[in-house]
Amino acid sequence: MEPKKNPNIEVGRNSGLYFAIGLNIMLLFTYLTMEHKTFETSKVILENIEMEDVFEEDIPITDLNMPPPPPPPPVLSAPETITVVEDTKDIEETVLESTETDQEEKIAERIVEVEEVQVEEVEEEVSVPFSVVEKVPIFPGCSGNTNQELKDCFSKKINEHITKNFKYPQTALELGIYGRVIVLFVVDKEGNITNIQSRGPDKMLEKEAERIIGLLPQMKPGLQRGNPVTVPYSIPINFKIQN
């Protein structure tokens, strides 16, 4: 029995091919959909910008007719003077004698007289520390029977002098500079304050400390074995900023 369907027009013959093509088309659409990007658009307002023409004024260049500088004064040369010297003098020739000596020539002995030499006595400056000097320098107004009482009075008067004459430098106060300044000075044989030196955190504080010590009055000099001696002394000065 012959089949009724025509095999050339069978619908399901190429179904696998159609399925593959359709699947590829769907995958392509899916990929394009996933890769599609959108951007937010902002409103842009276009306005007309009016530009004004700026005209630059040309400043004419003026030539200043300045007179030329005067020429330098001529240099006057001194007239040359020609002196005529008559060659009429006889020139005596000097004879050079030989300075060589022989063994028979003796050297004349010279007697050198030595005058009396005056020796000047130089007084040696003796410096004795404040802590070991037999009698410390006496500050004006101090009195005491013992050397320790004079030392205590000396230190007390020094502190009172510093408190009375203390003045914080304004620039150092504004910059917040503070610290301790060690001041070293010497009371010489006449009782004067000399050789003032200081060491601290800043030059302004050192200068103020030296100014205060420089105002100390003249004192009675320190004594060692009954003779006046120089006595060095050191004292700290604290610069503090109180809130």
Image: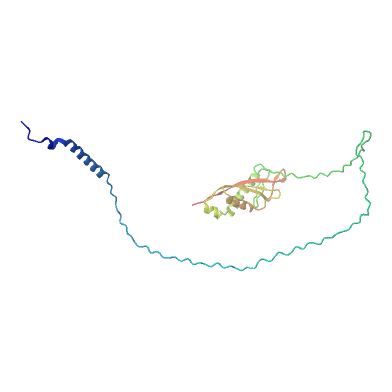
Is 217 left, or right, of 47 in this rendering? right
Badge count? 0
Which sits in the foreground, 71 or 100? 71
Could you say where residue 2 lies in the image, as x and y percent from the top left?
6, 32
x, y percentage for residue 14? 16, 36
* Residue sitting at the far left: 1
Position of 76 with respect to 199 (left or right) is right
- The foreground one among 209 and 126 is 209
Q: Nearer the viewer, residue 68 or 152?
A: 68
Question: Could you tell me which quadrant the N terminus lies in?
Answer: top left
**Figure check: 74 above or below 136:** below
Measured along the vertical axis of the image, is residue 6 above or below residue 170?
above
Residue 11 location, quadrant? top left
Left or right of 110: which side holds 3?
A: left
Foreground of the two, 100 or 47:
47
Q: Position of residue 42 (x, y in %)?
A: 30, 54
Q: Give the residue displayed 53% in from the left and 53% down from the top.
A: 173
In the displayed structure, 234 sits above or below 87; it is above
Report which quarter residue 35 is drawn in: top left
Rendering colour mode: rainbow
